[in-house]
Image: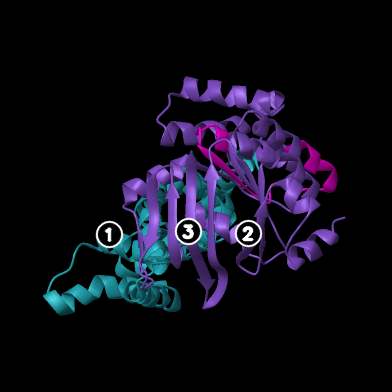
């Protein structure tokens, strides 16, 4: 039992690594994608739109397989499995985050831009000091949803052979003819998401100083 | 001294003429009110002047700098970025619905533009901010957030925010239209005080009694044109144009 728990904790670390690295890359990439989606240039906005449609319109599991195996067929070699997982999750989640960012940015009243312009703010300063802080507050609930989903989605990494928490639990279940490891994995996911959702609650409270 | 000269300003939205050739000048220390029915183009005029809307024709000069000019053939050319920026700094604008930054405290709303645009230090910006808040009767509110204030208080903060950048001209776009009637008085009082200090101002307003009271000169606009222009005494006492008479009659 002690040995099983240790194995599962190690696998949890892999899940957390996928989780953390995906957020690290997809949060900023999502902003770039959102900017592209809102670009005045129709070529850019259409290309980005197609990208978002593909990412949201096909299963993540298929995207992971594609990201890992496509280079084999095209170049004859691929990157390691873990890198493929991070790339796959990042481009998928960036698309979702982009749409949330876009919704947030477009919900800011035009008067905020006009006031900034008349006061003489630069475009960059307007975005970083006027728009972005208000966007963050507005998108927290939607972002909370996505981040919680990401915790659970890390279980899909096993499809290209990364031994994350759920895979290890399934293996242990098969080995010991017991559903206990899978149940324990469920508790692990629940605890991780309890932390995520508590963090978002705190963040929401912290930003509650204005309406 | 002429601070603003506008000549034959034209603006249309989707081919629909909103400003059909507006010309006037504004002198230093002068308070100019612009009145007229809704849709007459008063607000659009201010928005063109403050670069919130691009013009379709005409010339605008601000403090000796040409902001935009156009040829007889109707080719509009704006000044370079640097000039536009410097023109912008000469003009302050107070919006109908305040447009304060909701995530910043009252004081920060006033200090942020000073620090970013005029590169003032935090201490200096706060000193200026506190002085202006005192002048606006809001010294107790510096730590509050805009949503904790009444509409009238918010509008006073936005006036302070504009004043903090030392504009040469302060423009008001219907500053009391979004306020409950009992709150308009406090804003009108503030503008009146500024007029006494010889602040150069353009006030677009529906408050006829107020316009009559504070203005050195009043422009009456209708359907994208200046119909009549004159001192408050002349315009209210003896309006020449039938449209002006008809409009003012409703306010008697």
User: What colour has chain A?
Assistant: cyan
Q: Where in the figure is residue B50, as x and y percent of width and height?
A: 50, 51
Judge whether residue B181 is colored magenta. Answer: yes
Q: Which residue is at a point 38% across and 59% down the rendered structure image?
A: B69
Q: Which residues are magenta?
A: B162-187
In front of the other: A70 or A81 = A70
Q: Which residue is mark 3?
A: B7
Q: Which residue is mark 1?
A: A82
The chain letter under disc 1 is A
Q: CA distance from mark 1 to mark 3?
A: 67 Å
Q: Helix or strand or loop: what does disc 3 sit on?
A: strand
Q: Where in the figure is residue B65, as x and y percent of width and height?
A: 38, 46
Which chain is assigned purple? Answer: B
Q: Helix or strand or loop: what does disc 1 sit on?
A: helix
In front of the other: B122 or B185 = B185
Q: Tell me, yes or no, whether dots 2 and 1 are on the same chain.
A: no
Judge whether residue B18 is colored magenta. Answer: no
Q: Where in the figure is residue A80, as x and y percent of width and height?
A: 21, 62
Evaluate whether residue A149 shows in this view. Answer: no
Q: Which residue is at a point 52% across and 71% down the rendered structure image?
A: B12
Question: In the image, B97: left or right of A29?
Answer: right
Q: Tell me, yes or no, whether dots 1 and 3 are on the same chain.
A: no
**Residue A64's image quarter?**
bottom left
Q: Which residue is mark 2?
A: B42
């Amino acid at each position: 039992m002690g040995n099983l728990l240790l194995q599962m904790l190690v696998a949890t670390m892999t899940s957390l690594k996928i989780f953390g690295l995906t957020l690290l890359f997809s949060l900023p990439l999502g902003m770039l994608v959102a900017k592209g989606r809102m670009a005045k240039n129709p070529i850019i906005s259409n290309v980005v739109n197609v990208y978002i449609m593909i990412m949201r319109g096909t299963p993540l599991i298929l995207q992971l397989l594609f990201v890992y195996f496509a280079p084999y067929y095209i170049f004859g070699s691929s990157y390691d499995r873990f890198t493929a997982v991070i790339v796959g999750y990042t481009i998928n989640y960036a698309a979702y985050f982009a749409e949330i960012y876009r919704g947030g940015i477009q919900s800011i009243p035009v008067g905020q831009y006009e006031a900034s312009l008349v006061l003489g703010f630069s475009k960059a300063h307007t975005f970083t000091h006027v728009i972005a802080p208000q966007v963050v507050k507005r998108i927290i609930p939607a972002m909370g949803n996505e981040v919680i989903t990401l915790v659970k989605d890390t279980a899909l990494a096993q499809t290209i052979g990364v031994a994350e928490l759920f895979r290890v639990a399934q293996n242990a279940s098969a080995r010991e003819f017991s559903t206990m490891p899978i149940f324990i994995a469920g508790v692990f996911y629940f605890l991780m998401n309890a932390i995520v959702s508590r963090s978002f609650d705190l963040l929401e409270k912290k930003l509650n100083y204005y309406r | 001294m002429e601070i603003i000269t506008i000549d034959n300003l034209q603006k249309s939205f989707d081919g629909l003429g909103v400003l059909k050739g507006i010309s006037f000048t504004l002198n230093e220390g002068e308070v100019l009110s612009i009145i007229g029915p809704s849709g007459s183009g008063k607000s659009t005029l201010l928005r063109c002047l403050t670069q919130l809307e691009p013009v379709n024709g005409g010339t605008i000069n601000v403090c000796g700098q040409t902001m935009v000019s156009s040829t007889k053939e109707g080719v509009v050319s704006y000044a370079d970025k640097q000039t536009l920026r410097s023109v912008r700094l000469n003009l302050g604008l107070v919006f109908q619905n305040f447009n304060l930054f909701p995530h910043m405290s009252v004081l920060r709303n006033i200090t942020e533009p000073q620090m970013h645009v005029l590169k003032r230090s935090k201490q200096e910006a706060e000193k200026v901010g506190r002085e202006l808040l005192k002048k606006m009767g809001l010294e107790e509110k510096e730590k509050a957030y805009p949503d904790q204030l009444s509409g009238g208080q918010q509008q006073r903060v936005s006036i302070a925010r504009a004043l903090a950048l030392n504009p040469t001209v302060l423009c008001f776009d219907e500053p009391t239209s979004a306020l409950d009637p009992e709150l308009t008085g406090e804003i009108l009082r503030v503008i009146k005080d500024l007029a006494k200090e010889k602040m150069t101002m353009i006030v677009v307003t529906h408050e006829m009694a107020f316009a009559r009271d504070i203005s050195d000169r009043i422009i009456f606009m209708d359907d994208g044109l200046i119909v009549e222009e004159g001192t408050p005494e002349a315009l209210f006492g003896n309006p020449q144009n039938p449209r002006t008479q008809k409009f003012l009659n409703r306010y008697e």
